[in-house]
Image: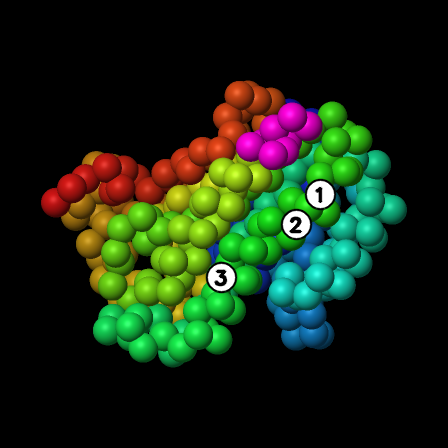
């Protein structure tokens, strides 16, 4: 399928082959896109990300192009500058950016811990989980304009809208992420750059393992969701491929729920 034929972009957040970013990359590659990647700095992190990329279709390659990967600590402006500078020198266009990163100190991600969250942990969660979307969009703006527009996509969760005990400061950060996406969509829309978020259901990932109560979330979802099951990574990957594609050319400033319908159920 060539829904994304000719489109090239950058994916932040593949930690292993269970990451939402991995499933998004799998879907984008399957629809004909070319993907470049980042990893957290450090030999162990880079090796882990590269190993995950190698399990993607054709080892993460598309059209015979070599896989491009660069280290990046998104909390450092100099790292983001270096990644986008290196990317634009190597690639002829930038059609999409996938923001699938988040961080909060796991000590405060447990039921009953939110009130005691210290200032530093609160601000760190906002910085890495939300501000980085604005920081990436700033650097993506000019190369996307040169490409005739593009799609920026970030990952959220229902805990941004409703209280999910144990999600705590991460829920606050995801609320900031969703609002950041809307403001970016307004300012970048004149350049045909669309900005959206996907609110995926709980998935067993490296990030979710830090959240206290994630097992209860996954046990409860099949009982409550209209589809009677937990979300799968491929569900989010398919939605991401649509949002990146020209089929979603009129969709921006939206938060798309891909959670088997659980967010629509009140009790």
Neighbour tally class for label 2: few under 14, some 14-19, many 20 plus, Cα within 10 Å: many
Measured along the vertical axis of the image, is residue 29 above or below residue 166?
above
The N terminus is located in which quarter?
top right
Element under disc 3: helix
Percent of width and height locating residue 73: 66, 65
In front of the other: 138 or 233: 138
Q: How many marks?
A: 3
Give the residues drawn in magenta, as a range.
Answer: 186-194
Spatial separation of the CA atoms under disc 1 and disc 2:
6 Å
Q: Is residue 196 left or right of residue 68?
A: left
- In the image, what residue occupies the spot 65% across and 50% down? 136
Dot 3 crowding, Cα within 10 Å, few <14, some 14–19, many 20+: many
> Left or right: where does residue 203 sit relative to residue 38?
left
Mark closer to the chain start, 3 or 2: 3
Mark 1 or 3, which is nearer the eye? 3
- The residue wearing badge 3 is 126
Predominant secondary structure in magenta?
helix
Q: Which residue is mark 2?
A: 136
Task: Give residue 191's quadrant in the image.
Answer: top right
Q: In this orientation, which residue lies closer to the viewer: 164 or 187? A: 187
Give the Cα distance between marks 1 and 3: 20 Å
Rounded to the nearest whole Å, what is the CA distance between mark 3 and mark 2? Answer: 15 Å
Q: Are marks 1 and 2 in contact (CB under 8 Å)?
A: yes
Query: Is the C terminus in the top left, top right, bottom left or bottom right quadrant?
Result: top left
Contact? badges 3 and 2 (CB < 8 Å): no
Residue at the image position 61 percent from the left and 28 percent from the top:
189
**Residue assigned mark 1:** 140
Residue found farthest to the left: 267
Q: Position of residue 65 (x, y in %)?
A: 80, 42
């Amino acid at each position: 399928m060539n829904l994304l034929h000719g489109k090239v972009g950058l994916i932040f957040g593949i930690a292993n082959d269970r990451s939402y970013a991995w499933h998004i990359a799998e879907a984008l590659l399957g629809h004909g896109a070319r993907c470049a990647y980042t990893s957290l700095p450090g030999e162990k992190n880079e090796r882990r990300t590269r190993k995950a990329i190698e399990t993607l279709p054709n080892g993460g390659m598309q059209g015979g192009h070599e896989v491009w990967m660069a280290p990046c600590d998104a909390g450092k402006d100099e790292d983001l500058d270096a990644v986008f500078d290196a990317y634009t020198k190597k690639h002829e266009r930038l059609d999409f950016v996938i923001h699938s990163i988040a961080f909060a100190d796991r000590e405060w991600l447990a039921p009953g811990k939110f009130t005691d969250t210290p200032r530093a942990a609160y601000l760190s969660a906002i910085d890495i989980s939300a501000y980085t979307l604005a920081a990436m969009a700033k650097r993506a703006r000019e190369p996307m304009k040169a490409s005739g527009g593009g799609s920026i996509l970030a990952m959220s969760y229902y805990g941004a809208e409703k209280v999910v005990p144990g999600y705590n400061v991460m829920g606050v950060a995801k609320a900031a992420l969703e609002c950041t996406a809307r403001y970016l969509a307004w300012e970048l829309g004149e350049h045909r750059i669309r900005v959206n978020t996907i609110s995926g259901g709980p998935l067993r990932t490296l990030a979710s393992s830090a959240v206290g109560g994630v097992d209860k979330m996954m046990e409860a979802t099949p009982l409550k969701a209209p589809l009677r099951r937990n979300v799968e990574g491929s569900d989010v990957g398919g939605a991401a491929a649509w949002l990146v594609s020209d089929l979603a050319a009129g969709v921006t400033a939206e938060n798309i729920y891909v959670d088997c319908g659980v967010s629509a159920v009140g009790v």
